[in-house]
Image: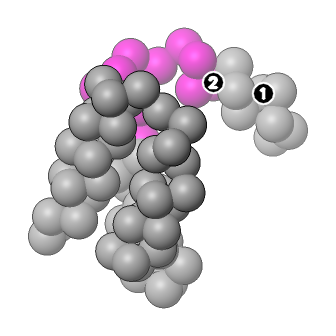
Amino acid sequence: MNINEQYENYRKQSSDELMETLMRLTAEQKQTGEMTESKMEEIYRMLSPMLSEGQKAKMREIIDRLNRPI
């Protein structure tokens, strides 16, 4: 699946479906060691200067949810 097809697939999903997809992909990446809590924090620190306060709060909420035990 190319990037445009992936975009179209995700664009059609509801926010709940997107969160389920994100949770599943993150769990897979945690199992393989590709994603860690510290890596998520690094991504947050890198992106947060470009985000509004509302976007930062939402991103923090998502990261905290992703870091909960599965």
Q: Amino acid at mark 2?
A: Asn
User: Dot 1: what SS?
Assistant: helix
Q: What residue span does the magenta drawing correspond to?
A: 9-21
Image coords of residue 1 (percent x, y): 81, 40
Eyeballing the image, is 44 above or below 18? below
Instruction: Give how far apart the Cα atoms at labels 2 and 1 are.
Output: 6 Å
Q: Is residue 38 magenta?
A: no
Q: Classify mark 2: residues with Cα within 10 Å, few (<14), some (14-19) or many (20+).
A: few
Image coords of residue 53 (percent x, y): 32, 29
Eyeballing the image, is 63 above or below 58? below
**Quadrant into which the C terminus falls:** bottom left
Q: Which residue is mark 1?
A: 5
Image coords of residue 49 (percent x, y): 51, 43
Q: Is residue 18 magenta?
A: yes
Q: Classify mark 1: residues with Cα within 10 Å, few (<14), some (14-19) or many (20+).
A: few
Image coords of residue 48 (percent x, y): 46, 45
On screen, residue 70 versus residue 50, left or right, reads left
Observer-nearest of 39 and 32: 39
Observer-nearest of 48 and 33: 48
